[in-house]
Amino acid sequence: MQKNAFSMESNETDFIIKEVEKTKNEISRIIGNQVVIKTTKDEILKEMKKKKELIEARMKTINEQEKKFSERIEKIRDEIMKKIQG
């Protein structure tokens, strides 16, 4: 489930990067649900690309943990099968 959430966040970040790259003027940004500030295209792109890198690092970590977990499950399964078979 968490992996799926990171995937969705990654897709959303890609979309933001593409849309910001299309702009030529200042960008307004909503912070929280109450404050709107103006920022530059470069600032947003820098932040979104850093966010994308962080998401990718988290996804890589989750994939590695998932692989280790699967390997451990397989090892335990094999040990149980050996004991059952005698």
Image: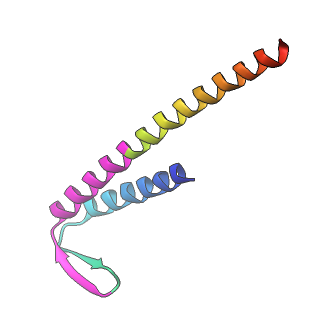
Question: Which image quarter: residue 80?
Answer: top right
Question: Which image quarter: residue 56?
Answer: top left
> Could you say which is closer to the camera, residue 22 or residue 52?
52
| Range drawn in magenta | 34-57
Where residue 4 appears, as percent x and y from the top left, is 54, 52
In the rendered image, the vertical position of residue 41 relative to residue 4, given as above or below: below
Where residue 42 appears, as percent x and y from the top left, is 16, 60
Where residue 58 appears, as percent x and y from the top left, is 39, 46
Taking 16 as reference, is 86 left or right? right
In the rendered image, the vertical position of residue 37 relative to residue 4, given as above or below: below
> Could you say which is closer to the camera, residue 14 or residue 34?
34
> Which image quadrant: the C terminus?
top right
Report the predominant secondary structure element of the magenta stretch.
Answer: helix
Residue in the picture at 41% in, 53% down: 10
Taking 34 as reference, is 82 left or right? right
Say if the magenta span includes residue 64. Answer: no
In the rendered image, the vertical position of residue 75 relative to residue 54, given as above or below: above
